[in-house]
Image (cartoon, rainbow, N blue to C red):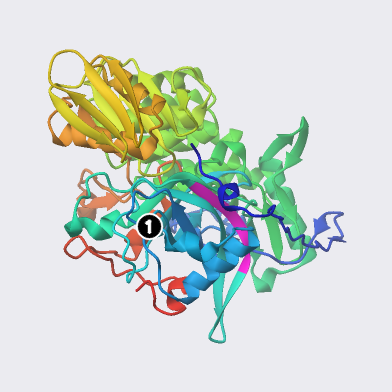
Amino acid sequence: MKPTWTWLFSKPLRSDRRRFLRLAAVTSAGLATAGLATGGCALPPILRSQSPEDSEDPVATSVKLISDYALAVGGYPLHIESIGLVTGLPGTGSDVPTSPQRAALLDEMEKRGVAYPNQVLASKETELVLVHAYLRPGIQKGDHFDVEMRVPTRSECTSLRGGWLMETRLRQFAEVKNQILEGKVLALAEGAVLVDPSAEGERDRLKLTRGRVLGGGVSAESRKLGLAIQPKHQHVLTSAQIGNAINQRFHSFDAGVKRGVAEPETDKYVELAVHPRYKDNVERYMRVIRALPLRENPSQRLARLALLERQLLDPITAATAAIRLEAIGNEGVKPLLKGASADDLEVRFYSAEALAYLDENGAVPALAEAARHRAFRAYALTALSAMDDYTAYEALRDLLDSPSAETRYGAFRALWAMNPHDALVQGENMSDQFSYHLLQTKGPPMVHVTRSFRAEIVLFGPDQRLRTPLMLDAGKDIQIFSRGGNEITVSRIEIGDEQKRVVSTKLDEVIRAVVALGGNYPDVVQALQQAKSRHALDSRFEIDALPAGGRTYDRKPRDDDEDDGRSFTIANPLPGLFARPGKDADERRKAKSHDGGDDDRQPSLLEKLTGWFD
């Protein structure tokens, strides 16, 4: 059963929400404006310089793009954190000594009306944890995200396995004049704690005292994206022109009313709504926005189309040319279709990717081909998922049968992003614990579980079975046992009570029995990983088999370019559909493990408070 704070209440919880005042003015163009609130760091320059051909056509190169006037802001993950409480531990918790973190948690418990908070913290069934997460760029109010936690280094806690993170309010913290200040609540988080199922014993204590709640965070507000106008161009008319240029190209519908995505707020800032087609690739969206021309007459447009077509067919400039043709819109389709049928794979990929975001089905063959190459896979699958086209759906469906685990699961996630209510990928909600999917596929049997994005189990092939005899643990209370034969007993043993389910060796039946006996997602994952390590599961078992960015592709050398044969990485940011903000941020800090131990990441501001979590 899901724990709630009411188990610990002595009085009703009162919620206190802050409201903010938005000042508005009217520009000379009649557009609403407001105070500058970029909400994030400016993105670095995002388009490569063009080839020397740029200088050959002064008409084409005289066109000024939005990138010449403004920088993208709000494009980085936002780090939020808090002190939280994990409950339901099987005697592995501890009473944390006096510290600022303990004081902060006691204060939170008192605000929530918890009776006898010191006694609660003294229990071996509870543990104080530092909770942190990342709000992705463009996240909307109500969207879910992963949260991570760790115990104090000096804590005597031995494991967070089996625990439940009580509802926790996550904030930003800032250091000002040697003081740590807290911001407003940006998200709430709670849920079952997933600990590395392979971790066991004192040697893995640090792994056992790290946990994650998949999709356990819920954003309390939408993160804004926008454009910060460069100081030398700051003017109310420039802001209005940028807004008009964007709204001529991009719009969405709100309750049936057509609305542009841009709202000029001041002479310094234009706020942007995320266009639905780019919901899983916000960074590309910002690239396309900045590639829009501020003003362009018909003769300039024709000259620029001709130049971009030439650049598109050259692998060196294809990435930039494709983005700029995508920004042009329908008039850019013809040269992009030409590029999608070019001999060079790189040219075909960049052209098809741009066509996909224009929802042109001519993109599908090249993207389906690119999805089978490691370097292009994440981008190709994301582009296919953005299309509202049956041929794109069929291409993704065919990729489910691929021998590559990464391609198969990547195609599944792309189909889910395309339409989560489609019968093929909708799956079942297992007791509000996780999403469960049985897929009828032609490829080899495979079980896939996640440690990011959302709690989810996918069985590629519904008839997978466990090998007996076996003995597996599913959490602290549930055992899976068989002496051999075609029957497996799933039991939940508690003081004074024992419940049993006898099922066949079909993996599907075993998973359902565990959930029926109260097992949660971490419990099922633990059992699956034990089954694989103890040779009770013959199927392939994968965890987070996600397409990655930053991979190299070996470009074929040309006779006229000695450097053209060197390996290169795709000139695109990794789409949000396959990004793991917390993991990627930690990798950027080059986190390392020593003897299965702690990492060398920079401490958060809460950690800096006393060094307690060092």
189 sits to left or right of 522: right
Of 470 and 370, the residue lying toward us: 470
- Most frequent secondary structure within the magenta stretch: strand
The residue under label 1 is 124
- Residue 402 in the image: above or below residue 99: above
Q: Position of residue 74 (x, y in %)?
A: 58, 59
* Magenta span contains residue 187: yes
Image quadrant of residue 35?
Answer: bottom right
- Residue 194 in the image: above or below residue 86: above
470 sits to left or right of 5: left
Image quadrant of residue 540?
Answer: top left
Of 438 and 331, the residue lying toward us: 438
Span shown in magenta = 183-190
Residue in view at x 31 percent, y 51 percent: 550
Q: Position of residue 70 (x, y in %)?
A: 62, 62
- Residue 41 in the image: above or below residue 368: below
